[in-house]
Amino acid sequence: MTDTEPTITHPPDLTRLRNSSSPTIPTKLSSSLSILSENAPSTATTTTTASSANPTRTTSPTNLQSLQHNGFIILPSLLPPHLLLAARATSKYLVQRTRLGTFWPHVRTVPKQYPPWPLYKSPDQGLNIWGVQHLLHPDLSVRDVYSEVYFCEEVLGVVRGLLAGEDGRAVEEDELVMELFNLLVSPGKRQGFELEWHRDDVRPDVTEDEEARLLSEKTPAGRQLHAQYNIALFEDESLVVVPGSHRRVRTEQERKAGKYDVLPGEVRVNLGPGDAVFYDSNILHRGVYGGIDEHTELGRMTLHGSVGLRGYGAERCRQVLQHGVGEWVDGDGGGFGSIQDEGKRRVAEVMRRNLVEMGRGVGDVGFSLEG
Ligand SMILES: O=C(O)CCC(=O)C(=O)O
Ligand SMILES: [Fe+2]
């Protein structure tokens, strides 16, 4: 694999959004979207804007307010440089070895959008991967690097803020639940692939009433019960979202639209290395993945993770356990003793135990979506 990856450009462009349907024209952001990207990670910021004629004091929205309003937030350069460097090197190795077969069987395969995916045992199966699953699995030899990233304060600090209750105070670390951590990659063999429009845990065939009920159940009294994110290790513009669609039922047009149609207001999320997008997983979204020549190109390598809030297992367990984490999280070697920093190790262990507790006694959870 030759190193044809884009060079790291810091700081990245702060307005990493554009209309997906007009790639070269910068997005005309509506007023509701113009607040995107202005927030510093994890804490509310207060800024003073002064005009000599009319000095006004405005408070920037917190990450949580922006996410609740738009359904997603973009945080440029979230991942610290040493973790970005380590995650890039590790992911190149992981993906290359995985594609060769016999190294890591847990993958997402083209053209299947949702779990379960077949196990990758040999390249002779002719499978083409668009993701590598279970980065925190104890049998994965490069797991240590991914645990340093998953449990890093830069990410968990943002998560604690997004899971805040009515008082707006960030939740404590021991209220967090370890959930999913995967790597999304460009399919090889120059075989492009697209995900259809979906919400992660609401089926498309539900009635309007059922859709409304499910959406409010998943964010009771407006509370986010989990935080989901993509952290790009290289340039990535695969994710397309409809801003604001996470808290409302689909419009007539959205219901009638084809699986891959352009939807009104859709935007493509454009991330640079180390940038993150946190999104409400019930926003209408899809993925568009250009195929690469895996022998000469790296393409997309984006960490795709989620962290839950303790006490809401009933709402979250299907989303998490349908991916099969319950089979290894409590097993031999599942602990995070390899994490060097004592505080971080403690948080990781608490979060893992919270996941084990969530899965205890839960039977077959089935799958959220089919296809
Ligand atoms: O590729 C992405 O960023 C989105 C993936 C996705 O929507 C999913 O796995 O449900
Ligand atoms: Fe999704």
Image: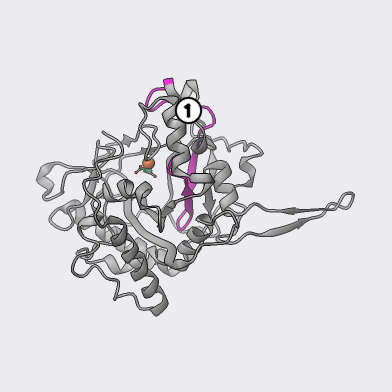
The N terminus lies in quadrant? bottom left
Depth check: give the residue in front, 90 or 224: 224
The location of residue 228, given as percent across then percent down, is 42, 51
The location of residue 258, given as percent across then percent down, is 39, 23
The location of residue 195, given as percent across then percent down, is 34, 35
10 Å crowding of disc 1: few (<14), some (14-19), many (20+): some
- Callout count: 1
Identity, as a three-letter code, of the amino acid under mark 1:
Arg
Residue at mark 1:
250
Magenta span includes 271: yes
137 lies left or right of 280: left
Q: Is residue 233 visible?
A: no
Q: Is residue 18 visible?
A: yes
Magenta span includes 265: yes
Magenta part mainly helix, strand or loop?
A: loop
The region drawn magenta spans 256-283
Depth check: give the residue in front, 262 or 97: 262
Q: Quadrant of ligand 2?
A: top left
- Asked where in the image residue 173 lies, by quadrant, the reply is bottom left
The location of residue 17, given as percent across then percent down, is 54, 42
Going 32% across and 45% down the picture, which residue do you hit? 186
The correct choice, above or below, for 153 with respect to 66 in the image is: below
Going 38% across and 63% down the picture, which residue do you hit? 150
> Tag 1, which secondary structure?
loop
131 lies left or right of 275: left
Depth check: give the residue in front, 70 or 293: 70
62 lies left or right of 231: right
Going 49% across and 66% down the picture, which residue do you hit? 172
The C terminus lies in quadrant? top left
- Asked where in the image residue 285 lies, by quadrant, the reply is top left
